[in-house]
Image (cartoon, grey):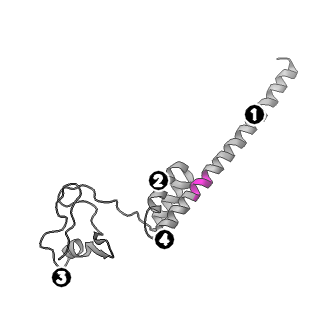
Amino acid sequence: MESQLTCPHCKKDILPSDYSEQKISGSQARNEVNILREKENHGLQAVGIYFCPKCGKKLKDKLPSTTFSKQLIVYAISFFLPPFGLWPAIRYLRQQDDKSKKIGLAAIFLTIISILLTIWLTTSFINSFNKELNNQLRLYQDIGY
């Protein structure tokens, strides 16, 4: 006998009570039959369900995309907007697959490089500005102001 998955919010069954291993065709097959994965020592786990079909509450976060275009967006945010790259990086690091973890590590690396580069450029600019200001003050002191 299979155990039913229940929503932690409304305590209702996520799957229909007449769920069985029978073959169902079309979208119903994708929605009902293919949402379960048997895991050792963990029982049944819902794979494709992110919201409860009864109450609509979020059951789990949707997995982040690992497409090339999404990677470029994450890397661009990490480099050009340094602190904001940490949120998607942590989200990718929390995933189970190696590709997501590599994307997260690369985003954190780019964020750190960008922060260090920003600090170095800012320090250089301030030092250059101070030198120029001191030269101007010395010039005015020599004139007698």
Relative height, residue 87 to residue 98 (above, below)? above
Q: Which residue is mark 1?
A: 130
Pick the front one: 133 or 92: 92
Alpha carbon distance from label 1 to label 2: 36 Å
For the point 29% across and 75% down, the residue is 37
In terms of sequence position, does the residue under pointer 2 or pointer 4 come before the other?
Answer: 2
Residue type, numbered disc 3: Lys
Q: Is residue 11 left or right of residue 128?
A: left
Q: Which mark is residue 23?
A: 3
Alpha carbon distance from label 1 to label 4: 48 Å
Quick one: label 3, few (<14), some, or many (20+) residues within 10 Å? few
Q: Residue furthest front?
A: 41
Is the residue under label 4 in contact with that under label 2 (CB below 8 Å)? Answer: no
Relative height, residue 111 to residue 42 (above, below)? above
Residue type, numbered disc 4: Asp
Q: Which is closer to the viewer, label 1 or label 4?
A: 4
Q: Which residue is mark 4?
A: 98
Is the residue under label 2 in contact with that under label 1 (CB below 8 Å)? Answer: no
For the point 53% across and 57% down, the residue is 76
Q: Which is closer to the viewer, label 1 or label 3?
A: 3
Q: Residue furthest left?
A: 18
Q: Quadrant of the image for the N terminus? A: bottom left
In terms of sequence position, does the residue under pointer 1 or pointer 2 come before the other?
Answer: 2
Residue type, numbered disc 2: Trp
| x and y percentages locating residue 32 in the rendered image | 21, 72
Alpha carbon distance from label 4 to label 3: 33 Å
For the point 22% across and 54% down, the residue is 9
Magenta-drawn segment: 109-114
